[in-house]
């Protein structure tokens, strides 16, 4: 059997009339939710409104609260305050909270009327309405370049009894640290030199897999 390894192609995420929706565990993943949240963070920080914070809410679909936590981690890493719903709420409540708090934006994890196997990422404008072109253009511009590059230095507790001390590290194919993070929450971006990785594997056959393995960019 021949296995062909390839760097995964980032999901193309396009926001429709009211957010982005996709199949859970297929395209709607924690990584892609973090990418969307990174886009919201780019919009908020670009306007200098980090101090206003972002409201994050979610529905009762599978894992919605954990997808919401993943989004919150990214915003906090950008020093953006988060008002996080303590339980599932209707989408309209999130819009109300955005307006009442004077927040820079809102995020709602919900797929509305879609089938139960889907989930979604909605963005609310400061007015409480669905985000318009001004906001979505910034988010989608960020999504075009952040595929597969976001590393989260998780800190604190996740609500499930698990503590995260930070101290994340990115290790290269030779086992050497490329980037080491401390105890503060943050977002880091690293690049991978695929040509150097191929050269290393060619020089040291013992590091190859038992079956033929071709690394494609």
Image (tube, rainbow, N blue to C red):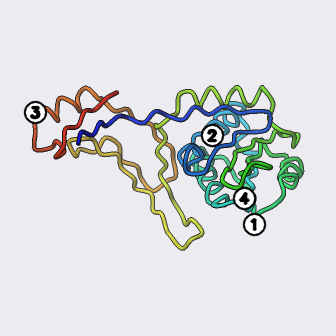
Residue that label 1 marks: 87
Instruction: Quarter of the image for the N terminus: give it.
Output: top left
Q: CA distance from mark 2 to mark 3?
A: 39 Å
Q: Residues within 10 Å of mark 1 (few under 14, many from 20)?
A: few
Q: CA distance from mark 2 to mark 4?
A: 17 Å
Residue at image x 70%, y 45%? 121
Circle nearer the viewer, 3 or 4 = 3
Task: Please say if 177 is above or below 132.
Answer: below
Residue that label 2 marks: 36
Among the two numbered marks 2 and 4 on one chain, the one whose residue lies closer to the N terminus: 2
- Tag on residue 203? 3
Residue that label 4 marks: 84
Quick check: 157 left or right of 48? Answer: left
Q: Helix, strand or loop at disc 3?
A: helix
Q: Residues within 10 Å of mark 2 (few under 14, many from 20)?
A: many
Among the two numbered marks 3 and 1 on one chain, the one whose residue lies closer to the N terminus: 1
Foreground of the two, 121 or 146? 121
Label 4 near label 2: C-beta < 8 Å? no
- Residue lying at the far front in this picture: please name it: 1
Foreground of the two, 109 or 177? 109
Quick check: 94 left or right of 189? Answer: right
Q: Position of residue 54 (x, y in %)?
A: 74, 48
Q: Position of residue 149 (x, y in %)?
A: 46, 37
Quick check: 195 left or right of 207? Answer: right
Residue 27 figure quarter: top right
Q: Position of residue 194 (x, y in %)?
A: 29, 29
Q: CA distance from mark 3 to mark 4?
A: 51 Å
Q: Helix, strand or loop at disc 1?
A: loop
Task: Please say if 210 is above or below 39.
Answer: below
């Amino acid at each position: 059997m021949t296995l062909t390894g390839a760097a995964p192609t980032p999901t193309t995420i396009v926001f429709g009339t009211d957010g982005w929706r996709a199949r859970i565990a297929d395209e709607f993943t924690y990584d892609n939710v973090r990418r969307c949240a990174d886009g919201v963070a780019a919009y908020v920080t670009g306007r200098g409104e980090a101090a206003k914070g972002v409201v994050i809410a979610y529905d009762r679909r599978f894992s919605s609260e954990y997808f919401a936590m993943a989004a919150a981690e990214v915003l906090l890493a950008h020093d953006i305050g988060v008002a996080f719903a303590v339980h599932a709420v209707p989408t309209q409540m999130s819009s109300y909270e955005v307006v009442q708090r004077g927040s820079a934006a809102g995020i709602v994890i919900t797929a509305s009327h879609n089938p139960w196997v889907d989930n979604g990422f909605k963005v609310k404008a400061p007015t409480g309405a669905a985000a318009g072109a001004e906001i979505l253009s910034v988010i989608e511009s960020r999504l075009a370049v952040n595929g597969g590059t976001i590393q989260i230095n998780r800190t604190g507790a996740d609500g499930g009894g698990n503590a995260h001390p930070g101290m994340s590290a990115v290790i290269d194919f030779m086992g050497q640290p490329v980037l080491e993070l401390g105890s503060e929450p943050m977002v880091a971006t690293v690049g991978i030199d695929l040509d150097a990785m191929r050269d290393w594997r060619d020089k040291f056959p013992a590091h190859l897999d038992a079956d033929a393995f071709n690394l494609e960019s």
